[in-house]
Image (cartoon, helix red, strand yellow):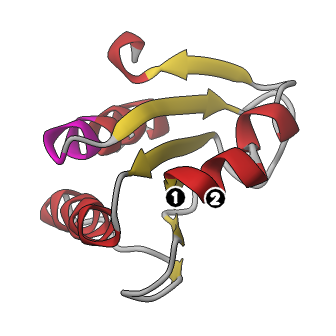
Amino acid sequence: MESREMAKVVCKALEDKKAIDVKAIDITEISIMADYFIVASASNINQLNAMQDEVDRVLFEQGIQAKSIEGNRQSTWVLMDYEDVIVHLFDEEDRLFYDLERIWKDGIIIDAAEL
């Protein structure tokens, strides 16, 4: 699956779980680490876990497994590394604190609906 299509699938999965402010950051021109960062927030830990489970499920159904997942069921920030697409799931407070959109401002921030 092409990385842009994978990013689109991830964003749809997150929106299905009512993720808050889902954004894709196209970093193809500024990093060799990945093609896209997906950033989304959850209003509580249960929603964050549901979002993580849904992303993992929909990509697994496409034959794609995470290279690694950082964070656990009590974490307020989960990083899911699918090589070309890296998914960052935060509670709302941590997302404001880490502000990945600012750190990666040289990338192209894409609203999930525009993918």
Q: Position of residue 25 (x, y in %)?
A: 63, 31
Q: Is residue 13 magenta?
A: yes
Q: Nearer the viewer, residue 54 or 96?
A: 96
Q: Is residue 5 left or right of residue 34?
A: left
Task: State which quadrant residue 104 falls in.
Answer: top right
What residue is rendered at 67% in x and 50% in y?
34
The N terminus - image quarter: top left
Task: State which quadrant residue 48 falls in.
Answer: bottom left
Dominant secondary structure (helix, strand or loop) of the stretch shown in magenta: helix
Q: Is residue 34 magenta?
A: no
Disc 2: which residue: 94
Do the residues under discs 2 and 1 have CB atoms within 8 angstroms? yes
Q: Nearer the viewer, residue 1 or 21?
A: 21
Q: Position of residue 78 (x, y in %)?
A: 51, 71
What residue is rendered at 76% in x and 55% in y?
33
What residue is rendered at 36% in x and 42% in y?
6
Disc 1: which residue: 90
Mark 2 closeness class: few <14, some 14–19, many ≥20 residues within 10 Å: few
Q: Is residue 109 left or right of residue 6?
A: right
Asked if 39 appears above or below 112 in the picture, the reply is: below
Mark 1 closeness class: few <14, some 14–19, many ≥20 residues within 10 Å: many
Q: Furthest residue to the top?
A: 114
Residue 85 in sight here: no
Q: Position of residue 54 (x, y in %)?
A: 19, 61
